[in-house]
């Protein structure tokens, strides 16, 4: 849609072209496109001065509540689907033959670079909770094209505990509780003990809560287990695995559910250490298939060090 | 432009349609349009995760530096032309006969509701500065259609002093220095003494400075005199008047220059109280011609009370 003719058609080009010759080309491309879209948005909805000023105050409120351990700007982007979209743009793989590996989704703010390596068959549960449902999780990592096992892939798992809190957020949890790195064996297999995941709400005491409330949306995320799967030859895969029984699958507040990441937890009766069984198999694509083979995952610099900060 | 086909065409509608039934209709319209434009922007420039995270940190930095007396979100909007655009959408008047009154521009953050009424012929200069160039300013307010004088119009003038600071910003200035309200006489005339205006820079110690620097743009505003002209029967006009000799007319950092607001200061030799003469005439449109007859000017709640705050 274009502006109604009563508005100056030269205004937006004038603003965009005000950028000087020293503007880096990529900044010119990004900022020019962003300014055009913001102007088009204002004209399309005929944004009023009062509505604009509400938006100004909303933007100011995002940074006002953010801290080194709370990134509300990141959360607002999640709530409007932007992080999921940026992830898709950066990481979606479709070969010329139409092949895609297991879906990638957003990393979220709770990944840690410090998770310890553990041995296959170990448990990541350092601090058991009475209501935690121990799950034997296992599967095989295969090459998307050949079906060959991917040996020595590293699976980095992290999850909230049965109280819906990550170790960062909970003074009762020891560091790296419910975190761990595992290497696949010569058959491409992995197996460990973890918890059935627990659903939780985004924090609603800030602008994200205001926005979700205006949009009449739930702040809940479906329960999920995070995985990051890496291998020198293969494109990294970031996963969130959702129990098929979770009631929030269709209303994920950050739009990170994909069909192939919805999994079935089954009763397990042959193992005194677990009551549930989860089989989850992954296919990986060689790095050459990735649209940005050298791109790094979008690791937020924030919300990873709450524990260490709060213990100062 | 639409997304490349490798990206899910259903994603953006899914995010927009996540809004629940209790979303107010206008919020649904505004937020739906904004989300669509932000998504289209990300796809068009293929925004990378690293670029997105830079944007997140930039948004957070806006609110982090804002205070009750500094509204950086407002300033960022000015730098991308959004306040000027919102003003145009709200206030531009063109009749069916193609008539327009004197142009409206943005209010800016330094208007005060507390300017005192003064008598025609008075000076608004309470605290003279040696380099201030006293100007005899005068003119006539007329009806856009009939040319009849507009009697009892209120002209509210405010301006920075010769040191480029407003009374709010300068402990050496008394309250309402270089502010005043005047009523037109029975001929629609007004006249007073003020200063030739002085150019100044936006504050560059925050995100607006970062953004202007990336865009290789000047932070300067051309020198200007603010006017707000009100009358019960006529659409309010907000003006900024710019000396035609100002070197920043084409690079105003907030895009608020309009051709009919560029004025000529002339030498004045017949008045011991002034060295310059400024004639500025205005045409006003009846309220019925305004697209939003009951709209109020976009008065920021911030940056108007610095003086009272800082004197606590």
Image (cartoon, coloured by chain):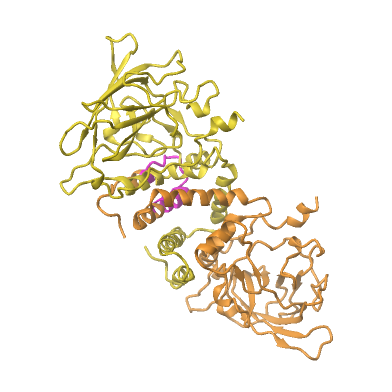
Chain colours: A yellow, B orange
Query: What type of secondary structure mainly makes up the magenta span?
Result: helix
> Vertical placement of B1 versus A5: above or below?
above
In magenta stretch: residue A59: no
- Residue visible at 73% across and 82% down? B138
In this orientation, does residue A262 appear?
A: yes
- Number of numbered callouts drawn: 0
Q: Position of residue A170 (x, y in %)?
A: 53, 25
The residue nearer to you, when weighing B274 against B25, is B274
In magenta stretch: residue B35: yes
Q: In which quarter of the image is residue B119?
A: bottom right
Q: Where is residue A130 in the image (x, y as percent from the top left)?
A: 45, 12
Q: Is residue A171 left or right of residue B132?
A: left
Q: In this view, does B97 lie to the left or right of A259?
A: right
> Vertical placement of B210 versus A105: above or below?
below
Which residues, given as a range, are shown in magenta?
B15-36
The residue nearer to you, when weighing B311 against A109, is A109
- Residue visible at 58% across and 33% down? A309
Q: In which quarter of the image is residue A34?
A: bottom left
In this orientation, does residue B26 appear?
A: no
Q: Position of residue B68 (x, y in %)?
A: 68, 50
Q: Quadrant of residue B234?
A: bottom right
Q: Is residue B234 left or right of residue B121?
A: left
- The N terminus of chain B - image quarter: bottom left
Q: Position of residue B75 (x, y in %)?
A: 59, 60
> Vertical placement of A73 versus A195: above or below?
below
The residue nearer to you, when weighing B81 against A261, is A261
């Amino acid at each position: 849609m274009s502006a109604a003719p009563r508005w100056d058609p030269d205004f937006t080009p004038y603003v965009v072209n005000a950028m000087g010759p020293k503007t880096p080309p990529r900044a010119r491309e990004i900022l020019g496109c962003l300014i055009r879209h913001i102007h088009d948005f204002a004209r399309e909805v005929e944004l009023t001065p009062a509505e604009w000023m509400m938006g100004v105050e909303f933007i100011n409120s995002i940074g006002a509540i953010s801290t080194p351990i709370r990134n509300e700007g990141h959360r607002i982007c999640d709530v409007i689907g932007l992080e999921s979209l940026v992830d898709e743009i950066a990481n979606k793989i479709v070969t010329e033959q139409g092949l895609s590996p297991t879906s990638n989704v957003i990393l979220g703010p709770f990944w840690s670079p410090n998770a310890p390596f553990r041995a296959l068959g170990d448990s990541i549960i350092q601090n058991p909770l009475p209501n935690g449902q121990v799950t034997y999780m296992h599967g095989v990592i295969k090459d998307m094209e050949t079906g060959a096992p991917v040996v020595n892939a590293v699976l980095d798992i992290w999850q909230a505990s049965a109280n819906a809190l990550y170790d960062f957020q909970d003074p009762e949890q020891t560091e790296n509780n419910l975190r761990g790195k595992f290497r696949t064996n010569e058959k491409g297999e992995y197996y460990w003990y973890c918890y059935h995941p627990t659903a939780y709400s985004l924090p609603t005491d800030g602008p994200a809560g205001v926005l979700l409330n205006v949009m009449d949306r739930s702040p809940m995320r479906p329960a999920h287990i995070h995985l990051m799967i890496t291998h020198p030859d293969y494109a990294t895969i970031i996963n969130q695995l959702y129990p098929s029984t979770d009631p929030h699958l269709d209303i994920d507040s950050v739009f990170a559910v994909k069909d192939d990441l919805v999994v079935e937890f089954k009763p397990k009766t042959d193992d005194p250490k677990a009551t549930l069984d989860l089989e989850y198999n992954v296919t990986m694509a060689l790095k050459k298939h990735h649209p940005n083979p050298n791109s790094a995952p979008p690791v937020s610099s924030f919300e990873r060090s709450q524990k260490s900060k709060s213990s100062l």
